[in-house]
Image: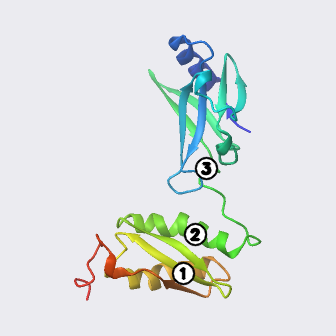
Amino acid sequence: MIHISESAQTHFRKLIEREALPGLGVRLSAVNAGTPRADVRLEFAEPGDLQGDEWAVDCDGFTLWLEAASTSYLDGAEIDYETLGTAGQLQIRAPKIKGVAPDASASLVERVLYVIENEVNPQLATHRGSVSVQEVTADGVVVLRFGGGCHGCGMADMTLKNGIEKTLLEKVPGVTAVRDATDHDTGAAPYISRTGAA
């Protein structure tokens, strides 16, 4: 499931020995798993810090505890410690941490949500904005709500038609149209004001 190189085990063992706490191990978890912001968290853990549902990976001289909710995202992860001159660098590769694109047999909703979270929202975040899926109708219409800098933005209509709808029609078979359900007059901090965009 997880591969921990000998050099990484040696590195952890030295750090744990330096702490000199009975039962001290290392806990690994995924943060924001399944999203473009996904990352790993690696921390020392004493037995009292554990939730009780972690998976134990026995290493040479210590235990690596894997958070139960993170197991599918960290499956196939590799942890290595590379010595670079007088210093070293810990490297963690987790190919599934950002999630796996749903295949063609997945529901239309699953496929839409994946594209929104992994392609559309990272682009909108550059303008402090986001969208959320309010509904996917039986005839393939995706209804969205804009948030952040996109809520009330004067360019929201263009973003919807030329960006989001174009992306969803191209990447998600079954999507027929995209609609905006946002009341843009209530936007508090638009990226571009609606009066300035006219």
Residue 13 found in image quarter: top right
In the image, taking residue 3 as reference, residue 169 lies left or right, namely left
Q: Residue 124, percent across and down?
A: 42, 68
Find the residue positioned furthest to the right.
105
Q: What residue is pinned by disc 1?
A: 143
Q: Residue 26, percent across and down?
A: 59, 26
| Residue in view at x 46 percent, y 85 percent | 161
User: Alpha-carbon distance for marks 3 and 2?
Assistant: 16 Å
Residue 197 found in image quarter: bottom left
Q: Amino acid at mark 2?
A: Val
Q: Which mark is residue 44?
A: none
In the image, taking residue 185 as reference, residue 46 lies left or right, namely right
| Residue in view at x 52 percent, y 67 percent | 119
Q: Which mark is residue 97?
A: 3
Q: Which mark is residue 115?
A: 2
Find the residue positioned furthest to the left.
196
**What kind of element bears circle 2?**
helix
Q: Earlier in the sequence, mark 3 or mark 1?
A: 3
| Residue in view at x 74 percent, y 72 percent | 104
Q: In the rendered image, which quarter contains the N terminus?
A: top right
Residue 74 visible in the current orientation: no
Q: Amino acid at mark 3?
A: Ile
Q: Earlier in the sequence, mark 1 or mark 2?
A: 2
Q: Residue 96, percent across and down?
A: 65, 51
Q: Amino acid at mark 1?
A: Val
Q: Nearer the viewer, mark 1 or mark 2?
A: 1
User: Alpha-carbon distance for marks 3 and 1?
Assistant: 28 Å
| Disc 2 packing (10 Å; few <14; some 14–19; many ≥20) | some
| In the rendered image, the vertical position of residue 150 relative to residue 24, given as above or below | below
Q: Nearer the viewer, residue 189 or 160?
A: 189
Q: Nearer the viewer, residue 122 or 139?
A: 139
